[in-house]
Image: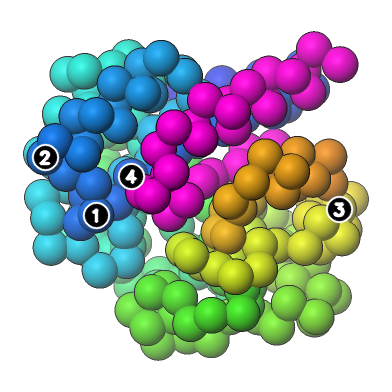
């Protein structure tokens, strides 16, 4: 895919929903990675995101392996600058706008900017908003920032709007990996009502019913990762859910 962001924009214009699988190299590698990539080839989600908050595994090795075995675009979802590789098709250039740690607002981005430009990788500026999912997430520990209270919808909405106004091309509403509570549909709906850029939703989605609710509330792209680590075969029903909505 020549331009990941353009594909997202064009899909939104057509009213199509998108679905991405998140692979954490720390948890999915070796035979489990090969097996899951085979399922990806059958189910054909729109994107494969690669990254995690506390990685020690080689991200580039995982990206290259996935690219060798599937044509689905591979997009970096980095927890820090050490998870960058020029081999990916694109990178979500994240700024943790829900937190106030300058390192994750701009510091990490400054440190990797020259590498991005040199590699000429497609960098998609993304306002990343961490919302309390009723469990302490790895992002909270790693970034040393607290999530926004899920009940404080006005703050979430205003943070998303501020992210758009300062130039973010995407807004990512994240409940955290393994969240007990995914982002509330009313929150998604209100963010969508004020933002003109595409909305990504992730964290805590573990059923087709939750996936459909997120789409109907206004999510343009939904990301699921943790659930597939124990239930890899569910990938097919999740992708089919997205297709079914398009057909209705």
Give the image quarter of residue 231: top left
Picture coordinates of residue 123 (x, y %)? 39, 40
Is disc 2 in contact with disc 3, using a CB cutoff of under 8 Å? no
**Disc nearer the start of the sequence (4/3):** 4
Q: Quadrant of the C terminus?
A: top right
Q: Is 3 rendered above or below residue 167?
A: above
Picture coordinates of residue 197 (x, y %)? 71, 42
The span from disc 2 to disc 3 (Cα, nearest Å) is 39 Å
- The residue that disc 4 covers is 23
Rendered image: mark on residue 30: 2
Rendered image: mark on residue 27: 1
In the image, what residue occupies the spot 36% across and 23% down?
Answer: 39
**Label 2 CA crowd tier, 10 Å (few <14, some 14–19, many 20+):** few
User: Along the line of sight, which residue is nearer the eye, 138 or 112?
Assistant: 138
**Label 3 CA crowd tier, 10 Å (few <14, some 14–19, many 20+):** some
Residues in magenta, as a range:
220-248
Is disc 1 in contact with disc 4, using a CB cutoff of under 8 Å? no
The span from disc 1 to disc 4 (Cα, nearest Å) is 8 Å
- The residue that disc 3 covers is 189
Q: Quadrant of the N terminus?
A: top left
In the image, what residue occupies the spot 80% across and 81% down?
Answer: 152
| Tag 4 secondary structure | strand
| Tag 2 secondary structure | helix
**Disc nearer the start of the sequence (3/1):** 1
| Tag 3 secondary structure | helix
The span from disc 4 to disc 3 (Cα, nearest Å) is 27 Å
């Amino acid at each position: 895919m020549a331009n990941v962001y353009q594909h997202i924009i064009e899909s939104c214009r057509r009213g199509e929903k998108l679905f991405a699988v998140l692979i954490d190299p720390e948890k999915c590698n070796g035979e489990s990675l090969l097996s899951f990539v085979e399922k990806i080839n059958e189910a054909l989600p729109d994107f494969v995101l690669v990254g995690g908050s506390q990685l020690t595994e080689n991200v580039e090795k995982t990206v290259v392996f996935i690219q060798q075995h599937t044509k689905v675009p591979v997009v970096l979802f980095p927890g820090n600058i050490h998870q960058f590789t020029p081999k990916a098709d694109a990178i979500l250039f994240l700024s943790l706008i829900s937190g106030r740690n300058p390192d994750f607002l701009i510091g990490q981005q400054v440190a990797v900017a020259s590498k991005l430009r040199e590699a000429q990788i497609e960098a998609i500026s993304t306002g990343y908003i961490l919302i309390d999912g009723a469990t302490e997430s790895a992002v909270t520990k790693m970034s040393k920032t607290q999530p926004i209270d899920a009940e404080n919808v006005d703050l979430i909405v205003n943070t998303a709007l501020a992210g758009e106004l300062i130039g973010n091309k995407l807004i990512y509403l994240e409940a955290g990996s393994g969240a007990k509570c995914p982002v509330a549909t009313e929150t998604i709906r209100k963010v969508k009502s004020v933002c003109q850029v595409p909305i990504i939703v992730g964290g805590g989605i573990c059923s087709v019913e939750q996936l459909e609710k997120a789409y109907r509330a206004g999510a343009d792209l939904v990301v699921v990762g943790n659930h597939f680590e124990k239930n890899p075969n569910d990938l097919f029903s999740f992708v089919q859910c997205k297709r079914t909505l398009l057909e209705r």
